Amino acid sequence: MKERPSAIDLFCGAGGLSRGLQNAGFDVYWAIDSDTAAVEAYRRNHGSHVVEEDIRETDPALDGPDIEPGMLDLVAGGPPCPSFSTIGRAKLGSLEDRSAEEDDRNVLYRDFLRYVDYFEPAAFVMENVTGLLSDTAIVESDTIQQSLPIDSASAGEPVGKEIPVPEIILEEMNTLGYHANWEVVDAADYGVPQHRKRVFFIGTREGDTLPDLHQLKTHREPKNETEQTMQVRSTPGAFKQSSQTTFDTEPAVPHFNRGDTVKRPYLTVADAIMDLPPVSPGGEMPPREATEYTLPPVSPYQEWLRDIPEDEDWDDQTLRNHSCRGHNHLDLTIYKLLGHGVGWNIGDVSQELQPYRDDVFPDKYKKQNPSKPSSTILAHIQKDGHMFIHPTEARSLTVREAARLQSFRDSYWFPESRTSAYRLVGNAVPPRLAHAVGHAIREEVLE
């Protein structure tokens, strides 16, 4: 049997990318992040091979994993680029004496490339927000030359020239000796119950063939209302669609097969979270926190999320991170007014209904639609839950519900601190999407 390919995870966060790569058959030997809570979560779920360091202050030859250059299969990571994000740009712009252009985190991708340059992996994958694709930057050739320990004169542009950020990144990747390109994908197309568009830069050292992620889609828009109904599991291990088409030999989470023409309807919010017991901000009945399941899994996806060991019953499991944050009466009243999938932009309603200054942070109330994938889970959920209102209960989503919508299984550990846990969940790469990317790289590049 072929040895499992090797990988390292830069800017690893809570480990969503690592978990997906592991599911795709990779061994992740090393990971790094500067966030203490993220490193704790990663260590709890993956092991002690994670390092808490600011990557900008590390030398891959001295501080990186003990792997010889040229022997590593994959360098993966998602360098944070807040100034490429619409929300990030608004937040940075509201800070005194600071702007998005001055935020040095938007060039952390060059630290990612420093590790690629040193380890010379067979391939790399870099995940980021799609806002990066519409950004431009003033490029100075001496800046690029100082950022990478290579002769990057060919990567430079005339001083002061404004060019698209993707072109800058691809040129620097090419300078390192890689054939690279980027691809935008929606996580919902790969079995994540959430619309989440992200861009993946993928590069290979040998050959000019890059994986086509669109060939691995497993899900699609529903064709009718029947396909939007929550899928109900029949017998253990069997998968039954609401359209009465039965896949008795298919798992709840389908395999990735290149060019597979049979695709399932999108997984929905109901498919993901509606088996979880109710909780309430009042803390009486329903309680504020639930630590036990009250129902068995209803949908096939819920059964997969429960991750129940063979020697256990569903009611023997402990439910974690399912507690409700507090809400004031104004919030709760507005939550009740909203229909499924309805959102109010702050600024479009009267001043009495606005929880924020609309000139600082554009925000909105949004109740999730149980018959569709959720809207994009963002790290901003740590601040409040207005954009992530439960479809049937007057409250925002719990950490466990948000994690399920990101395709984290219930056995995945997150901190008890809701603020830290929300941030880690919102920033994570959905494991199911990472699995698809890892599968494409392993099958179409490494093998």
Image (spheres, helix red, strand yellow):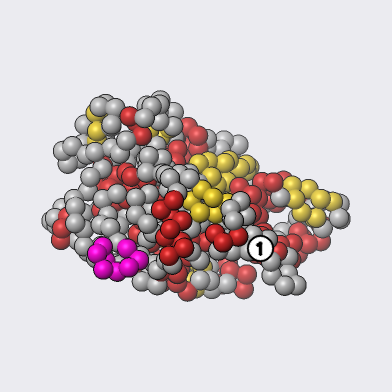
Q: Give the range drawn in magenta.
A: 280-287
Q: Which of 71 and 421 is in front in this view?
A: 421
Q: Identify the image quadrant of residue 137.
A: bottom right
Say which residue appears at 21% left-offset and 58% top-offset.
293
**Residue 243 percent location from the top left of the image:** 29, 27
Say which residue appears at 50% left-offset and 41% top-offset.
186
Q: Does the magenta stretch include residue 277?
A: no
Residue topped by disc 1: 360
Name the kind of residue labelled 1 in the image.
Answer: Val
Answer left or right for 416 relative to 76: left
- Would residue 406 be visible to someone looking at this image? no
Answer left or right for 311 relative to 375: left
For the N terminus, the quadrant is: top left
Q: Considering the numbered disc 1 on the image, is that residue within a helix, a strand or a loop?
A: loop
**Residue 239 percent location from the top left of the image:** 24, 35
Label 1 crowd bin: few (<14), some (14–19), many (20+), radius 10 Å? few
Say which residue appears at 39% left-offset and 37% top-offset.
266
Answer left or right for 282 relative to 96: left
